[in-house]
Image: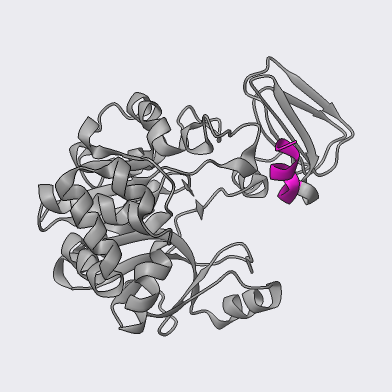
């Protein structure tokens, strides 16, 4: 039984302005300074699991050319262009319906394009075990990341029992908690971060969609049969795959999780980037030719400049891209979207 992979690449990454813009969002940027964009790194680690001919990307129609340029190995027909943003359930349902037409019994990996995985070999091991499970069981596997801190920015997966390895049943999904609740989750030992990475058989997930969201399922079928993407896709319900499929399926004991620890981060903000960069002795992390003097706990991305010299900053974000610059306290980074809109 063959495997396919779906990369979701439609986001605009507005929290990383000016590095990420609606015209060229973060999934297409070499944000780690390693010579590969986030979507290229995602494809690289999947390539060890399934062939590039079986790779699919769902993205906004205005990013299709960027995807083709950065991932030229992917068949053009496998780059699905969304005419409007409708969240993850329509995106995933469309891709899986297309995969079923091409490979009726395929196993499918679904992953975001903008997450970071520091240990791709361990990622591949976990995904292979999950694929083996979905090949032999009519269940859905969501990858759960073992928490190393009480994180309030992630949703959580509650598994049945304190599983140390392998695959465990999921009891329920929990929304982003407050700090005290997050501390309790970590102490309990049976809560994992929800990475938004899924493994399933294409028939399992389409049957679940038909069961829990029959109208959406019918619309997707009609859209694929008729090819009227521009007309039908913008009318689809705007709903996440968690709400549409994962939560109701977990109540029916159809969802499982594979606990994992492969250096994952959703790279959702500058703080998460700072965490993944190498630091100097004062806690500064940077991409580009940056010289720090009496600075501490800063994160700098200025790969487009010849040299950046900073003095006397404590806990700042500094970023430059295409003539636009941000200098902002890290404690105020939640306001970056507000600042960039001015």
Quick check: can you spot residue 218? Answer: yes
Quick check: 303 above or below 74? above
Magenta highlight on residue 183: no
Q: Nearer the viewer, residue 231 or 164?
A: 231
Residue at the (25%, 29%) spot, across then down: 73
Q: Position of residue 89 (x, y in %)?
A: 36, 59
Name the quarter where the C terminus is drawn.
Answer: top right
The answer to whether 305 appears left or right of 252 in the picture is right
Quick check: can you spot residue 117? Answer: no
Residue at the (48%, 79%) spot, across then down: 190
Name the quarter where the N terminus is drawn.
Answer: bottom left
Q: Position of residue 37 (x, y in %)?
A: 46, 32
Most extreme residue toward the top is: 306
The quadrant in which residue 93 appears is bottom left
Q: Position of residue 282 (x, y in %)?
A: 79, 42
Residue at the (42%, 44%) spot, across then down: 84
Q: Position of residue 279 (x, y in %)?
A: 68, 41
Q: Nearer the viewer, residue 228 or 63?
A: 228
Q: Which residues are magenta?
A: 333-342
Quick check: 218 above or below 34? below
Q: Nearer the viewer, residue 306 or 15?
A: 15
The quadrant in which residue 182 appears is bottom right
- Main SS of the magenta segment? helix
């Amino acid at each position: 039984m063959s495997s396919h992979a779906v990369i979701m690449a439609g986001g605009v990454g507005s929290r990383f302005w000016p590095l990420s813009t609606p015209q060229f969002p973060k999934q297409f940027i070499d944000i780690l300074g390693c010579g590969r964009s986030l979507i290229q790194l995602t494809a690289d680690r999947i390539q060890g699991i399934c062939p590039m001919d079986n790779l699919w990307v769902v993205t906004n129609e205005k990013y299709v050319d960027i995807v083709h340029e950065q991932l030229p190995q992917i068949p053009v027909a496998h780059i699905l262009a969304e005419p409007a943003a409708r969240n993850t359930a329509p995106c995933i349902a469309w891709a899986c319906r297309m995969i079923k037409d091409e490979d009726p019994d395929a196993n499918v990996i679904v992953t975001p394009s903008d997450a970071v995985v520091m240990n791709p070999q361990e990622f591949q091991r976990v995904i292979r075990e999950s694929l083996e499970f979905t090949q032999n069981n009519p269940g859905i596997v969501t990858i759960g990341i073992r928490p190393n801190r009480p994180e309030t920015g992630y949703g959580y997966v509650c598994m049945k029992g304190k599983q140390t390895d392998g695959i465990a049943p999921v009891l329920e999904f929990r929304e982003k908690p407050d700090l005290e609740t997050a501390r309790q989750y970590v102490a309990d030992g049976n809560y994992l971060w929800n990475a938004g990475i899924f493994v399933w058989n294409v028939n399992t997930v389409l049957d679940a969609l038909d069961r829990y969201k029959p109208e959406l399922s019918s619309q997707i079928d009609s859209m694929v049969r008729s090819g009227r993407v521009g007309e039908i896709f913008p009318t689809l319900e705007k709903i996440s795959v968690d709400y549409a499929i994962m939560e109701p399926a977990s109540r029916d004991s159809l969802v499982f999780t594979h606990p994992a620890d492969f250096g994952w981060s959703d790279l959702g903000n500058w703080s998460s980037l700072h965490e993944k960069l190498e630091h100097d002795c004062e806690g500064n992390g940077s991409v580009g030719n940056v010289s720090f003097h009496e600075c501490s706990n800063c994160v700098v991305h200025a790969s487009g400049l010849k040299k950046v010299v900073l003095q006397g900053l404590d806990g700042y974000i500094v970023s430059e891209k295409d003539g636009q610059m941000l200098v902002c306290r890290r404690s105020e980074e939640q306001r970056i979207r507000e600042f960039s809109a001015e």
